[in-house]
Amino acid sequence: MTLTHPLILVIGNKNYSSWSMRPWFALTMAGIPFEDIVIPLYEPGSAERIRAHSPAGKVPILIDGPVSVWESLAILEYLAERHPEAGLWPRDPAVRAVARVVANEMHAGFLPLRRECPMNMWHPPYAAALSAEAQANASRIQEIWSDCRRRFGEGGPFLFGAFTNADAMFAPIVSRFETYGVAVSPDARAYMDAIRATVAWRRWRAAALTESWVMPNNEPDWPQVPRLPS
C-alpha cells in the first residue's frame, strides 16, 4: 500500500515574510493541497524551531515526506516538477526560459527597494520617499511586467497569461508597491489588480491582518496609525 502525506510549508509571519509568501501563493493558486506551519520570526525560540526543519535556519521550507526544500525559488522549481499538471512554468521552452529569467532577476535583485520597503501588509498605504536606487528598481520591475504582458500575456491577466511561478515571485512586490505608495503605470496597476483579486492574495492578507507579532525593523518609520480591521 502506498502511503500518502500532505505537503507542509513552514513559513514566517504572513504580514512580513515575503519569501514565505512566494511558494504559499504558488501552492494556493495551483490548488495543490498543503498545510502551513507559521513560525513568527525573531521571537524567543524562533531560530531553534526553524532549524528543526532546515539546516539553513531560514523560511520557507517545503516538507514532502522525507524531502525538505528550504529556499523559495528551489521550492517553486520542485513544485513545478512534482506537479507538472499545475502549469507553474509556461509550456513553451522559449517562453519558459523568459519566465525563469525574470523570476531569477526578482530573486537576486532589487536590493535597494527590498531594503527600503520591507513587506508590511497591515500598514495603510503611505507615499514613502524612496532613494534613486529604489526608484530605479521600481521602474525596472514595471518594465518587466509590461514586457511580459505585452509579449506573452494574451491568455490571461498574469505575466504569461495563466498564472506561473513568475507571478508568485512578484506577488510580494505588489504588496510593497501598495504599502509604500509607489507610483505605477496603468499597465502595472492592471497587473497589480489581477494579483490582488486572486483567492491566494485574499487568504494571505486576511491571515496577515490577524497576526499580533510585531517586527520593529519591518515597521516603517512613519506616524503610527491604527491597524486595519481584520
Image (spheres, rainbow, N blue to C red):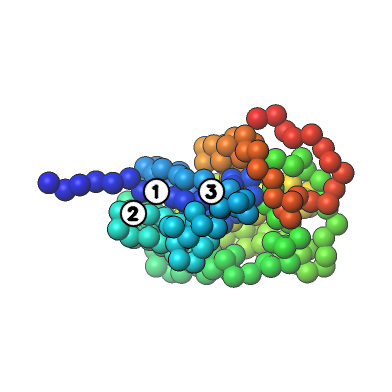
- Dot 3 falls on a residue whose secondary structure is loop
Using a 10 Å C-alpha cutoff, classify the residue at mark 3 as few (fewer than 14 neighbours), some (14 to 19) or many (20 or more).
some
In the image, 65 versus 108, the foreground residue is 65
| Sequence-first disc among 2 and 1 | 1
Residue under label 2, please give it. Answer: 64
> Three-letter amino acid code at disc 3?
Ile
Residue under label 1, please give it. Answer: 8
> From the viewer's perspective, is 145 left or right of 101?
right
In the image, 23 versus 45, the foreground residue is 45
In the image, 71 versus 10, the foreground residue is 10
Where residue 62 sits, quadrant-wise, is bottom left
- Dot 1 falls on a residue whose secondary structure is strand
Task: Kindly report the distance in space between the C-alpha atoms of the residues bearing marks 3 and 2.
Answer: 18 Å
x, y percent for residue 101: 52, 69
Residue under label 3, please give it. Answer: 39
> From the viewer's perspective, is 105 left or right of 189?
left
| Viewer can see residue 42 | yes
